[in-house]
Amino acid sequence: MNKALYFLSVLFYFKSYAQKASISVFAGGGVSYVKSKGQPISFNADYPKETSSKFFPVVTPHFDVRFNKPVSHGTGIETGVGYARRGYRQVFVDKTIYPNQTFHRYENNTRTSIDYIRIPVTVTYQHQVSRNASLSLATGMDYGFAFTARQKGHFTNSYSSGEVTIQEYDRKPDIKLLAGENRFASYNAYWADFFLFDVALSFNIQFRYKKKFLLRVLQSYSLYAHQPQETSDFKTRLRYTGLSVGYSLWR
């Protein structure tokens, strides 16, 4: 008898818990880019140099399932699991001017993409705007686990003699648990392997209509480097600004 009562009480507890929770699915895209600071690595440093490294944004997709549990009036805890691609385009230029006034100009144009399984943990606050509409804010952490990466592009060598060589490449960098030495020592030093983990600050604003239809704007700021840094002075961090539409499956 006692076991039956215990089972029923647990069953009613989970039923009550589930009734208050919501499960939603989202799909969308956004702009992935890199925030850089400092001076990139320079080759043949014994000679006068003109070195630059510029990053450009790219458009990438994301999909996720979110579970939201209210904890008090208007506030809740949200988590889930999803897929997100982060990436950027990088143009690296290194020009060496020799004493006899000849030069060598090296340019690498790379498109990088990294695929992550991401798990968010955020605190949400919801405000009921009208009978059919609500607005919510969320902030917290977003934990990423990289499972594949790709770098595609070409590099160009130009010489004062007029000679120009172009070579294309398409490679899959390794995903590593810990930082290690760069496998590519000289001109390809920025072709580093990528780290397994990414930890980011996450913010989003969500509009809900008729309890089912969702529109979400999100922003994420990675706290750590996604690959070994070229020098101690040159630092890069991933950033993402996205928009997604969603549907609440259970509320």
Image: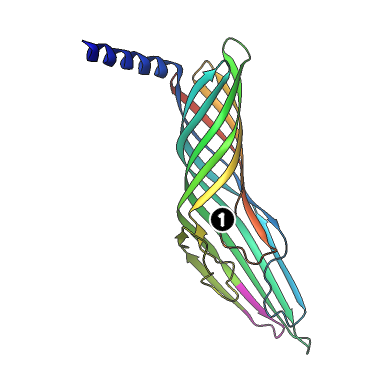
Q: Is residue 161 magenta?
A: yes
Disc 1 residue type (three-letter): His
Colour scheme of the picture: rainbow
Q: Quick one: label 1, few (<14), some, or many (20+) residues within 10 Å?
A: many
Question: Residue 239: x percent and y percent?
Answer: 62, 47
Residue at the front extreme, as displayed? 2
Residue 89, image quadrant: bottom right
Q: Residue furthest left?
A: 1
Boundaries of the magenta span: 156-164
The vertical placement of 211 against 97, above or below, is above
Residue sitting at 61 percent across and 48 percent down?
Answer: 223
Q: Nearer the viewer, residue 87 or 221?
A: 221
Tag 1's secondary structure?
loop
Residue located farthest toward the bottom when viewing the structure as drawn: 100
Depth check, front residue: 147 or 196: 196
Q: Residue at x 75, y 82 (%)?
A: 47
x then y, percent, for residue 226: 56, 55
Q: How many numbered marks have been drawn onto this rendered protein structure? A: 1
User: Against 125, is 42 above or below?
Assistant: below
**The quarter of the displayed image where residue 2 is located:** top left
Q: Please, is residue 172 above or below residue 85 in the view? A: below
Residue 137 in percent (x, y) is at 62, 27
x, y percent for residue 163: 65, 83
Say if 213 sits above or below 39 in the image.
Answer: above
Q: Is residue 35 magenta?
A: no
Name the quadrant of the N terminus.
top left
Residue labelled with disc 1: 226
Quarter occupied by the C terminus: top left
